[in-house]
Amino acid sequence: MPDDNSSEKIKKRFKELNQDAKKNGYYLNPDESFTMGLVEGLLKNAERYGYESCPCRLSFGEKKHDLDIICPCDYRDDDISEYGACFCGLYLSKTNVEKKITAPVIPDRRPSLKDRLTEKNNSSISNNLSYPVYRCKVCGYLCARNNPPDKCPICKADRERFEIFIR
């Protein structure tokens, strides 16, 4: 059970995350008890490691090896697009929130450290992109990922306003 001081920190961080999510077209899980538990985990990991690594994944404890799971993690957008929620369930799609669909069980996309290091080494000698690059036709925002975001984080245009810029 968190003490009053840590409870206040959790509430403060929740409010910051919620404001940032809304500002950027994302939705926090409306199950406040569940979400507060995740926020508490983020804060504990920040104390432990110096960064807010996903509380639902095993951290290596070294920032250079955990950059992909610092919240919001590299896998959030693809998970939301495909499953309606991110791996830990902190972020849900607009549809899931509106229809009150709980976060489903999502397979972990995170490759092993060995695979990530191999991929990094191979990508430096390869001219092929790992992901297509999408461009917001409204503001020009570019993002490299499997699918365009539901909303542009810059101008809030809907996903239909994105086009493939580079394959």
Image (cartoon, helix red, strand yellow):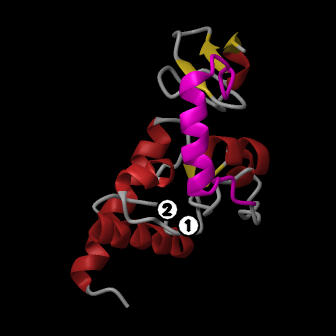
Q: Which residue is drawn at 65% across and 53% down?
A: 111
Of helix, strand and loop, which one carries label 2? loop
Name which quarter of the figure residue 161 lies in: top right
Amino acid beneath label 2: Cys
Residue under the image location 41 percent in, 43 percent down: 20
Residue 155, given in percent of the width and then of the height, sits at 50, 20
Range of residues picked out in magenta: 107-132
- Tell which residue pokes out farthest to the bottom in this image: 1
Quarter of the picture containing the N terminus is bottom left
Identify the residue under disc 1: 57
Q: Does the magenta stretch include residue 118?
A: yes
Residue 95 at what x, y percent from top left? 74, 46
Quadrant where the C terminus lies? top right
Q: Which residue is drawn at 59% across and 68% down?
A: 31
Q: In this view, does 77 lie to the left or right of 69?
A: right
Q: Position of residue 4 (x, y in %)?
A: 25, 83
Q: Which of 53 and 60 is in front in this view?
A: 60
User: Is 4 on the left-hand or right-hand side of 124?
Assistant: left
Q: Looking at the rendering, which quadrant does residue 9 occupy?
A: bottom left
Q: Is residue 62 above or below residue 163?
A: below
**In the rendered image, which residue does mark 2 sit on?**
54
* 125 shown above or below 23: above
Count the marks: how many?
A: 2
Residue 8 in the image: x percent, y percent? 27, 73
Q: In this rendering, is residue 56 above or below 115?
A: below
Q: Does the magenta stretch include residue 120?
A: yes
CB-based contact (under 8 Å), mark 2 and mark 1: yes
